[in-house]
Image (cartoon, helix red, strand yellow):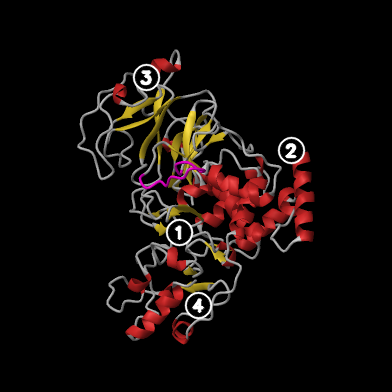
Amino acid sequence: MKHVLILLVLASCTDTPRKNSPVEEHRETAPACAASGGNEFGPDECLVDADCPFPLEQACACAGTTFERGQTRNLCVTAGCHVDADCGDGGLCSPSVGDCGNAFNGVQDFECRTPNDTCGADVDCMQNGEPGSCSFLPEVGHWACTFVMCAG
Amino acid sequence: MAGITMRWIVGALVVAACSTEPAGDTRYFEDRGFRREALVASLVEPSNDYSQLRLARYGVDGGWDALPEWNPPVAIAGEPAVRLALDGDLAELGEQAFYRYPVQLWANEPAGLWSDATYGEGIVHVELATRTHTAASCATCHATVRDGMLVTGLANASLDLGWGPGRLDVTTIDGHEPVRIPDLRPVRWLTHLHADATVRQPDITALAIRIETLLITSHAEAVRPPRVIALALATYLWSLALEDAPPPPPAQFTSACGGCHAGDGLTGLPVPLAVVGTDPTVGLSRDRGTGMYRVPSLRGVRDRALLLHDGSIASLEALLDPMRTTAGHDFGTSLSGDDRAAIVAYLKTL
């Protein structure tokens, strides 16, 4: 019986239980980014959302401000929201990050948090001892843990 | 769905009875136990992360079978978005899926995309409930334009996601395991898949499962492809292989290369890392490592812009150059200049 209990305890500690921690980052207001000087993939694409080619559907993700994922220039990314107010009363507009190459690390998208989300922050996402990301999944329309690198 | 599946089973049986083309095993569609067995048999190193994830989720209660099937409307080449029709010819569906099915949603368009009048700009546009998203298809990485013609299966050696053209890391967040984008044209000849030989390929079902699980993981385990798409892609990829026998090799090739690169596919069983001697990082990968490297098929090698598993060599001449500084795969480098030239000339006929 003692061994069974020990095994149960060990099993429960292998991965962090999935939960919805408080959202770490969200856009109360749309920021003005500082000029970064660009990186090896090109110059800054924007300083503010209005600089993006499709400002209603895109937002300006500032270099180096989110999750420290190696995003080293300001990029126009897709945006389902621009500020928290776009997400309704008490809503949160958060940056979703991805990990596919240096050109693709960092913010991929700004999206509203939803009642269907299965995570709140990266700390909720752990698999085989490796951290994942709490990201927006366009395929299903809510936030969930991902452990995705480049497909292949 | 049951009607579509039945149509496919009948269609596959007809194909199996009437031609020598690979039809796949129809149990792949309906028999979870069969799929599970095929997966387990295909995994070379059950303890690596790639295998562990699949063993935990594929063909088991509460696993990936429960995910919703995903076949979203996709637009290419400026045409209206349409879903893939799942009830046509299997190889034809495979070709459509190769160029249209979204493998991974991308926020940005990378450098080095190809352009083609029929298949567009090397990426696809997926219509989802929220908005239209950019996505990579198989062809984003595994097609390229040569002499004005789009070559299906050949690696896009211009695509740059941050590791330099023609290379990417599919396993680690910090990006320290980049590999060459492989040439998929000779995949039918391969005994093993992945640079680090993670997956055995005894039959087309193994390739279909490898593709199916790739599409599940690249969509964050949120959706899965219709299985007919995975089998169609596998069928299409197998159809790309050159069927004719290669020309007889010169003696220099047989002695220096033939120990590993043999048969009509000029490939063979995986080789231990110490034998090939190239950078062992990928072969020792926690994610996919097996302690071996796959032996690539040399069919079509003349078209490849990068060589070795990590793309660290840029030409056949450089591979056989006795003065090269990149370590490993020294086979043939000690031969005379004339003998090396004979090998290169032969490789350029394949």
Name the disc covering residue A83, or none. Answer: 3
Quadrant of the drawing holding the N terminus of chain B: top right
Disc 1 is attached to a residue of which chain?
A: B
Ranked by sequence position, the earlier of labels 2 and 1 is 2
B5 lies above or below A63: below
Q: Are marks 4 and 2 on the same chain?
A: yes
Instruction: From the viewer's side, name the closer residue of B2 and B173.
Output: B2
Q: Are marks 2 and 3 on the same chain?
A: no
Question: Can see residue B171?
Answer: no
Q: Dot 2: within a 10 Å radius of its alpha carbon, few (fewer than 14), some, or many (20 or more) residues? A: few
Q: Dot 1: within a 10 Å radius of its alpha carbon, few (fewer than 14), some, or many (20 or more) residues? A: some
Residue B199 position in % (x across, y down): 56, 62
B116 in the magenta segment: yes
Residue at coordinates 56% horizontally, 38% vertically from top-left?
A: B222
> Between tags 2 and 3, which lies in front?
2
Name the disc covering residue B1, or none. Answer: 2
Q: Secondary structure at mark 1?
A: loop
Residue corresponding to mark 1? B286
Distance from disc 4 to disc 1, alpha carbons, whole Å, reads 26 Å
Kindly identify the amino acid type of the residue bearing the numbered disc 4: Cys
